[in-house]
Image (cartoon, helix red, strand yellow):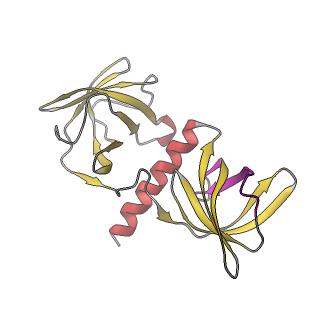
């Protein structure tokens, strides 16, 4: 694991209750694990309770599960995971995401059909042209009880029988970004294991 984690890299830590997700910085990489300094107090994290970890390195998005050996304030000493995997080579995991949704800019509303989504953005089709210079609000349902709200900025629009639009997200809260990152990672794993 020492060759996969780097001192100074950012890492996302998601305990069983994703609402207590946290971010931090890897402070030291040891033979038996690593030390991370969290941004916030570690709510919902207990010694020997497994968490999910997401970080970037030169090979892509690294994902693994492990647990804290020690919790000392915001500093955690994490055990080496038994295994790890790369979710994909791009910065954010992209998954198939097919929904009829509404894209809003003030009083203007566009009906869209989504193709895929990641924590970085999404791709969809739309019957009418949208303004590439505008920003749009959208709510993304992730389950029957969970959704995230974000701002969508169009980057590329292709005209065919309908318009195909790709763009990036900006978030109203960092928590929404973490929730969508975790959703895409889990969906990616589920799809691979089918």
Q: Position of residue 71 (x, y in %)?
A: 31, 22
Image quadrant in which the N terminus is located: top left
Residue at 32 percent of width and 68 percent of height:
193
Classify the position of the C terminus by image quarter: bottom left
134 and 136: which one is in front? 134
Residue 39 percent coordinates (x, y): 44, 24
Instruction: Note whether 71 is above or below 179 in the view shown.
Output: above
Q: Is 173 placed left or right of 74 in the picture?
A: right
Tell me: 106 left or right of 135. right
> Which residue range is magenta in the image?
130-149
For residue 3, side relative to residue 181 (left or right): left
Along the horizontal axis of the image, is 124 left or right of 109? left
Residue 86 placement: quadrant: bottom left
Does the magenta run of residues contain 139? Answer: yes
Instruction: Give the image location of residue 32, x and y in percent.
Output: 13, 32
Q: Residue at x 78, y 64 (%)?
A: 110
Q: Can residue 187 be seen by looking at this rendering?
A: yes
Residue at image coords 60%, 57%:
167
């Amino acid at each position: 694991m020492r060759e996969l984690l780097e001192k100074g890299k950012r890492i996302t830590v998601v305990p069983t209750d994703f609402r207590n997700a946290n971010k931090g910085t890897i402070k030291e990489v040891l033979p038996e694990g690593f030390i991370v300094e969290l941004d916030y107090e570690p709510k919902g994290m207990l010694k020997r309770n497994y968490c999910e970890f997401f970080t970037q390195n030169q090979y892509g998005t690294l994902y693994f599960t492990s647990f804290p050996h020690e919790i000392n304030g915001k500093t955690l000493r994490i055990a080496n995971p038994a295994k790890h995997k790369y979710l994909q080579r791009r910065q954010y995991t992209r998954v198939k995401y097919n929904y009829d949704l509404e894209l809003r800019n003030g009083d203007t509303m566009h009906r869209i059909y989504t193709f895929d989504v990641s924590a970085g953005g999404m791709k969809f089709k739309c019957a009418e042209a949208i303004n590439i210079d505008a920003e749009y609000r959208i709510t993304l349902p992730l389950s029957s009880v969970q959704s995230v709200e974000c701002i969508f900025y169009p980057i590329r629009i292709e005209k065919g029988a309908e318009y195909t639009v790709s763009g990036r997200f900006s978030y109203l809260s960092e928590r929404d970004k973490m929730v969508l990152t975790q959703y895409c990672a889990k969906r990616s794993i589920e799809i691979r294991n089918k």
